[in-house]
Amino acid sequence: MLDKILFYFFAAVAVASAVLMVTRRNVVHSAIFLITALLATAGIFLQLRAEFLFIVQIILYVGGIMVLFVFVIMLVNLDVALQQIQFARQKWVALLVALALAGQVGLMFWSSGKMPGQGLPVLTAAVASNLPPNSETVAHSLFDAYLLPFEIASVLLLVAMIGAVVMAKKRT
Amino acid sequence: MMEALLHGTIDFLKLYWAPLLCGVAVVAVLPLIVGYIVLVERKLMADMQARLGPMRVGPHGLLQPIADAVKLLIKEDIIPDNADKLVFWLAPVLSVGAALLSLAGLAIGPAFQIAQDINIGILFVVGISALGIFGIVLGGWASNSHYSLMGALRSSAQLVSYETAAGMALVSALLFTGTLNIKSIVEAQSKEGIWFVMLAPVAFFTYLVASIAETNRAPFDLPEAESELVAGYMTEFSGFRWSLYFLAEYANMIVVASVATTLFLGGWLRPFASVPWLNVLDFLPALLMVAVAAYCVVRVPKQPTRVQQSFMMAVAGLCFVVGLALVAPVVLPVAKPFYAGIHGGFWFISKVSLYIYFFMWLRFTIPRYRFDQLMRLGWHFLIPLSIINVLLVGVALIAGSYFHLQGWGLLLVTTPAAVITLVAALLILAVDKERDARHDPNAASDFYAG
């Protein structure tokens, strides 16, 4: 019961703040709502007993990336930014993407309704105390099962990082 | 049926109400503790500058924090006209909320922890306390003032730069335990019989410096540098809102001190906890408290008024009672079960206090850094140093397991690792200096300096 209440609370907060994030004109307010959405998602992770994902979401996205976002936003002159036309260029593309996504989700719901047990996966609930520690599980799957993709992703990030440094470097 | 219901109720209370009560207790007591930390800081500053410090309210100014709190609470609440009202209101609350929430993950003794024994313990504390930065950044932005914005910018740049070094320092200590759980970290130090500050001294140093920068304390208090930015991000805040920022800063100090204590200084363990012939040390806390009580009694005749004399006697009595409570578990067999709780709490709080004392000492000793110096220290020195340290500690641990070393024996491999890291650090400094010599020092654009 409590689980359900918490889930719907976090889900509602995440959805509402995501909508607010897109609709605010003030960039800092958008950033605050993005932070709220990320925190609510972290709450859902915690509810799934994925503590490690919960804290990584908070440390990386909220504590790291969003701090940088806000930092950059403050360097921008807000008054000028507010006068510029927003949301104009990509209206049709966005509509197409949104429709495709809605279709996908709808298809999933529709197929699950039509063929019970074949659409949405039905998982058996694990007993909370029997779950292995989440950080160990993540570590094993990253460094045992998916070592190569993990390393490739790190190399990709490294390339992006070096590229950014090279581009930002002063040409003397 | 009834029994099942009863058990269910007890479980429910244990799961939800006990942590809630603990949380309320912490929120209620913390402002008082912070007030007294501020008093200690002022007294210490006065002592180092050959002054007396607050002396008027209570004997030796012992009631000063309460007077300060009342003053702050009844001050007028000012919100600037052009401020973003909602964000202005939200920002100090965010700062304090993050600091208080991260306290929940700490374990003060083997028996006392507010949150359940969470698997991610140390990450929870570090990650949540880092969220307090939003209070500073958003508060600075919402004030709609240049000084505040400058302070906020500096603060976010500073945090992003030093978080990496602090994280790396944590990693090199965590390599010894293989777990993130706070209790297991302390138990690992008890099992090895050696604190991790001995095994990873470079990591401890890195964390020390980075934690000062993260809590915005002098000499790295550039976000509120009063000689350049009035009061930095706090410029437009006054009264109760200002005191919330203050509370958050000191709560953050307690958090970083507790993290350092847990990871590097053996948490609630007594010094040399696993050496049986040093069990005499168990009497040390009680002796200390009795000594303080005796000092208070000696000082009673020097107090000017009758009220102050009786206050002094009361302090002496309190210290004596605490001393009795500390000696009871060692002497009385009845009180034996409370030994871990009482003495664990004493040692933990003592270590945290020492760490905070060191912060204050630095504040009164070292002048404030310039912002570009701060950035250089972070990016050119601390981050390379901490990365090299993680690598070398890992190598040392592999060597240790190869030679089957344990406890103090691990020093045989970790000390060379620390020495090599130090040599590397000196090399980094030398290279940096040489590069500076080649460049014109005035050419670097100093964007954030006032």
Image (cartoon, rainbow, N blue to C red):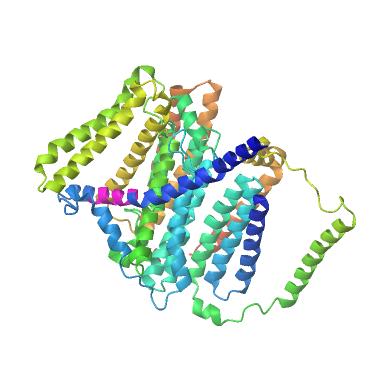
| B169 left or right, relative to A94 | left
Residue B442 seen anywhere in this rendered image of the structure: no
Q: Where is residue B249? Give x, y as percent.
A: 38, 54
Q: Name the residue furthest front.
A: B2
Kindly give the residue lying farthest to the right in the view shown. Answer: A115
- Front-most of residues B148 and B84: B84
Residue B40 lies in the magenta-colored region: yes
For the residue pair B232 and B315, the one nearer the viewer reads as: B315
Q: Residue at x 44, y 52 (%)?
A: B99
Q: Position of residue B421 (x, y in %)?
A: 43, 37
Q: Is residue A89 above or below residue A141?
A: below
Secondary structure character of the magenta stretch overall: helix
Query: Where is B363 relative to B315, above or below?
Result: below
Q: Residue at x 86, y 58 (%)?
A: A113
Q: Is residue B246 magenta?
A: no
Residue extent of the magenta highlight: B33-42
Vertical side of B109 occupied by B220: above or below:
below
Which of the 4 image quadrants contains residue B356?
top left
